[in-house]
């Protein structure tokens, strides 16, 4: 194999240590002819201490003909086939900087290979700069058939949406090569790839992608997992004002055509009437079975849009782009969708898994502190169910999560989603008689009863209800002798320390134990007329049971401040 390693001096410092988060991947440069891939690639390789390889040179060596001759003798399909095999071979070898031909990234298989084994960088250049750089070149087959302006503009329109799938995008300027190479080197060294949590299911799976700037890159992240570059974004009026433009821009950069349906914020939209109106909007937009529904918002938007996607045309591709911490760690993962009725929460719905979840940590900066704290309750819940070490991490880092520390937030989201993914993968549709996915309802029997009693107008957020429910679940477990009372004291102390309500008395109202138990009996977790609970034998040791005396539930509620039934 020919290795084109530039030896000319460029004034760079000694090669730096490459970030370990790149995982030993080769660096792959993509872009149109004239973008500067070869010239800049040589300097980048020198700066990083890696060999530089030009795909076209390797293709010519493998075929025994020049690129122009291959096009003339055998046609473009034959050239792409050789190119594809050469790129696969190169990326299977030692780490390199690889400059690809302008059309290489158009091939779906080649993109998949680069995505799995390389760090791709799109060098994006404007048309005037491209024209200046390719003027007078006679070895470019695609430029020899007509007006270069029209040809290059056509290639921009055709190829840029695919180049947008690259991991890094850097704009080429009319500047010295060394200057461009320095910017590219800095971008490589600073690049933080998003975290990915796989959700593995029997019929396939998807990734939860966690990181900064994901909305602006949404098109490149969604395109590989969707059947069509058309999407209808469902969002609410408040989220639309904050994030819709960024998401639409990210989708349209990758060639998506988009439409938007806005709903009113709040649980009131998650109704039979709201669902019917949304489905009517989707059908009115002429959606096809390959058109994706993208939920941009919190749990209400995700649940409502997901159920509409599940039912419209018997199932549309669905994407979750959660904008609250609670939705990022809970409702967006696992495929539960649904709407409320006067009888209770989420009593109508379907399991409909997303194709991908984008958890952009940047959006958390726009959340009110109360919303952040509410989301944190679902993070703590994951540790309490089955990961005592994670709960200890929460005790150490919870203040950072609710206080806006990006690193703490990303790690909390990753660990909570990984835990939920493991549970969902083992019991996707909550069909196991004991434990399984039902464990994720720790604290929720109490929480849903509180929400039904208070109403869904915002007086009590779901995460706040869950926090109180967690304390009550530990209290009930201790009363029945399953765990030490000190466990509940420890949990409630931590919840209070991060600003969450951990006791019914903190809601400044008096509840009726009888009314709360009546709400529980209408809950989805009723089985054969018996109320089932998720209880604990200690922190990280949850289990499900139907063996709970009603009088024990009443007594726990009374001790928490409820009046007598």
Image: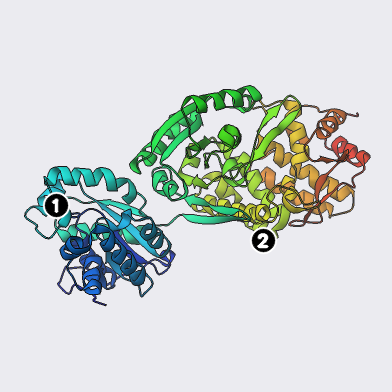
Residue labelled with disc 2: 389
Comparing 315 with 210, the one in front is: 315
Quadrant of image for the N terminus: bottom left
Horizontal arrangement in the rendering, residue 470 relative to residue 135 (left or right): right
For the point 85% across and 45% down, the residue is 476
For the point 68% across and 45% down, the residue is 495
Q: Position of residue 177 (x, y in %)?
A: 16, 59
Q: Is disc 2 placed on a helix, strand or loop?
A: helix
Horizontal arrangement in the rendering, residue 447 relative to residue 477 (left or right): left
Q: Position of residue 108 (x, y in %)?
A: 38, 55
Q: Position of residue 132 (x, y in %)?
A: 10, 50
Q: Residue 282 has which mark?
A: none
| Res 264 seen here | no
Farthest residue, direction front = 73
Comparing 150 with 562, the one in front is: 150
Quadrant of image for the C terminus: top right
The disc, 1 or 2, on the residue closer to the chain's N-terminal end is 1
In this rendering, which labeled residue sits more in front, label 1 or label 2? 1
Quarter of the image for residue 303 reads top right
Q: Is disc 1 placed on a helix, strand or loop?
A: helix
Residue labelled with disc 1: 143
For the point 14% across and 72% down, the residue is 8
For the point 50% across and 51% down, the residue is 209
462, above or below 280, in the image: below
């Amino acid at each position: 194999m020919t290795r084109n390693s530039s030896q000319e001096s460029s004034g760079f410092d000694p090669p730096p240590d490459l970030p370990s988060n790149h995982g030993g991947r080769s660096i792959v440069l993509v872009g149109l002819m004239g973008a500067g891939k070869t010239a800049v690639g040589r300097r980048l390789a020198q700066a990083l201490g890696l060999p530089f390889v030009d795909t076209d040179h390797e293709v010519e060596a493998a075929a025994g003909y020049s690129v122009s001759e291959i096009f003339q003798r055998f046609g473009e399909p034959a050239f792409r086939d050789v190119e594809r095999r050469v790129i696969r071979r190169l990326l299977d070898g030692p780490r390199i900087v690889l400059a690809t031909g302008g059309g290489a990234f158009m091939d779906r298989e080649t993109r998949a290979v680069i995505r799995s084994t390389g760090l791709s960088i799109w060098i994006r250049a404007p048309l005037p700069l491209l024209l200046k750089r390719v003027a007078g070149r006679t070895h470019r087959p695609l430029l020899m058939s007509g007006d270069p302006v029209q040809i290059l503009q056509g290639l921009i329109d055709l190829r840029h949406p695919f180049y947008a799938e690259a991991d890094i995008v850097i704009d080429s300027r009319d500047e010295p090569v060394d200057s461009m190479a320095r910017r590219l080197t800095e971008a490589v060294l600073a690049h933080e790839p998003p975290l990915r949590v796989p959700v593995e299911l029997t019929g396939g799976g998807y990734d939860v992608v966690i990181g900064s700037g994901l909305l602006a890159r949404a098109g490149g992240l969604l395109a590989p997992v969707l059947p069509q570059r058309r999407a209808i974004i469902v969002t609410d009026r408040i989220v639309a004002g904050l994030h819709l433009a960024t998401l639409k821009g990210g989708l349209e950069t990758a060639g998506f055509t988009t439409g938007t349906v806005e709903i009113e914020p709040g649980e009131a939209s998650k109704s039979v009437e709201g669902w019917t109106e949304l489905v009517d909007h989707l059908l009115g937009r002429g959606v096809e079975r390959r058109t994706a529904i993208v939920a941009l918002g919190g749990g209400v938007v995700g649940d409502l849009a997901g159920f509409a996607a599940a039912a419209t045309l018997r199932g549309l591709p669905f994407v979750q782009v959660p904008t609250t911490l609670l939705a990022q760690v809970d409702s967006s993962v696992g495929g539960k969708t649904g709407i409320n009725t006067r009888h209770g929460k989420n009593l109508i719905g379907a399991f409909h898994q997303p194709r991908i979840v984008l958890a952009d940590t940047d959006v958390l900066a726009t959340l009110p502190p109360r919303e952040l704290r509410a989301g944190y309750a679902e993070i703590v819940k994951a540790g309490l169910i089955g990961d005592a070490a994670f709960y200890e991490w929460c005790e150490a880092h919870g203040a950072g999560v609710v206080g806006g520390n990006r690193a703490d937030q990303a790690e909390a989201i990753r660990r909570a989603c990984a835990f939920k993914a493991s549970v969902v993968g083992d019991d996707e549709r909550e069909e196991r008689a004991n434990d399984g996915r039902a464990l994720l309802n720790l604290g929720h029997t109490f929480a849903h009863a509180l929400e039904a009693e208070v109403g869904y107008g915002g007086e009590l957020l779901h995460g706040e209800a869950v926090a109180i429910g967690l304390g009550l679940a530990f209290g009930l477990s201790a009363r029945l002798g399953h765990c030490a009372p000190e466990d509940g004291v420890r949990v409630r102390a931590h919840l209070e320390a991060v600003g969450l309500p951990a006791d019914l008395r903190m809601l400044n109202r008096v509840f009726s134990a009888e009314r709360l138990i009546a709400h529980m009996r209408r809950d989805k977790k009723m089985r054969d007329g018996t109320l089932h609970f998720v209880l604990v034998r200690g922190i990280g040791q949850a289990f499900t049971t139907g063996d709970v005396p009603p009088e024990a539930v009443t007594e726990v509620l009374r001790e928490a401040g409820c009046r007598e039934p």
